[in-house]
Amino acid sequence: MKKIGFIGLGIMGKPMSKNLIKAGYDLVVFDIVPEAVEEVVAAGAVAGISPKDVAARSEIIVTMLPNSPEVKQVVLGEDGIIEGARPGSIVVDMSSIAPLVSREIAEKLAAKQIRMIDAPVSGGEPKAIEGTLSIMVGGAQEDFDKCLPVLKVMGASAVLCGDIGAGNVTKLANQIIVAGNIAAMGEALVLATKSGVDPDKVYNAIRGGLAGSTVLDAKAPLVMDRKFEPGFRIELHIKDLGNVMDTGHEVGVPLPLTASIMEMMQALKTDGLGEADHGALIQYFEKLAKVKVKR
Ligand code: NAD
């Protein structure tokens, strides 16, 4: 399968699509932002005129969009993928969306013999650029096997977690853990700073121990340098935690920890930080303690 459609060329979609071009795939791309399309076309892709057009010219159609409504619109809406895709082609939705919506979309596609896997990612922009994302997949084994060479270009690992929707359930679990780690890091570095201990020393002393984590290594240096450009926007993390809450309540799982971190993020959004990186969660704790964490 050499012909790939790619829809959604944002922070993540741009480097992911460029890596596919570098690996020798023929790409047809689409985004509602013309500059994003121009940049990927300059890297070797061809511009499609709509999701329908992209789908008609591809064997695998990758989507990397913000949330469930955008994926529904692009796949099932007017001039959507469903109108152009040929039977046997596979939609690979790599956006982080509600698992129930993945199942709903897959059912509608199946009625037209169009296959789908959900394949959200973790790792953020740096790993999207390196092609070393962690990819969590839901769908049929046969479809996963067909898409694996393509996924391996974008990711260091791709794990089939279960049927359609299982990729997004896994991503929700991932987002609970990431949010919790960032919140704990924020509270801890604020405590250190206000106690008069250099947060950089604290970070270096603990990073090799049990408190060390990928999140700590990715976010602590940025926070201490006061770098809050996204990365992963607070607004998108709020979206993910909203999907966590909906899914949890649907299956009967109370989520007290996620609920409180979600409200901290909402407070920051109200404060005008919705577009900042989720590392800016530390500013919630800084405000409470009247202190700033920096090197
Ligand atoms: P983004 O907002 O930078 O990119 C989304 C792109 O989709 C934009 O270019 C936008 O113009 C395009 N788009 C929106 N509606 C569209 C439509 N109807 N038709 C065509 N294009 C449309 O977001 P991102 O950071 O690239 O994230 C994409 C997905 O990946 C999200 O679900 C996010 O949660 C997930 N994700 C992001 C990160 C990260 O660090 N940024 C990490 C892991 C997962």
Image: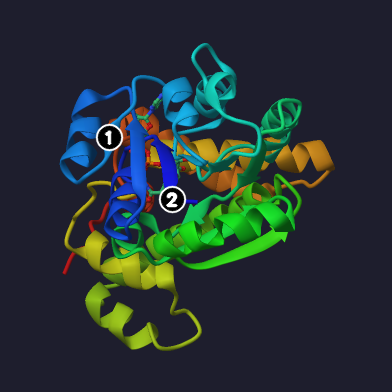
Instruction: Provide the residue designation for mark 2.
Output: 2
**Ligand 1: which quarter?**
top left
Answer with left or right where residue 59 lies relative to residue 186.
right
Confirm whether residue 62 shows in the render: yes
Q: Give the residue at x 25% y 82%.
A: 201
Identify the element where label 1 is drawn. strand
Residue 129 in picture, x, y percent from top left: 29, 59
In the image: residue 94, left or right of residue 9 = right
Q: Residue at x 64, y 56 (%)?
A: 144
Residue type indicated by callout 2: Lys
| Closer-to-camera residue (177/110) | 110
Q: Position of residue 54 (x, y in %)?
A: 42, 29
Q: Residue furthest right?
A: 252
Would residue 29 appear left or right of 99 to someone viewing this image?
A: left
Which part of the image, by quadrant, shows the C terminus?
A: bottom left
Q: Quadrant of residue 42?
A: top left
What label sits on residue 26 in the rendered view?
none
* Residue kind at label 1, given as amino acid type: Val
Query: Is 120 or 113 nearer to us in this picture?
Result: 113
Q: Residues within 10 Å of mark 2 (few under 14, many from 20)?
A: few
Ligand 1 is within 8 Å of the C-beta of the residue at disc 1: no
SS under mark 2 = loop
Residue 249's spot in the image, x, y percent? Answer: 77, 38
Where residue 243 sits: x, y (%)? 62, 38
Residue under label 1: 46
Instruction: Give the mark, 1 or 2, whose residue is nearer the N terminus.
Output: 2
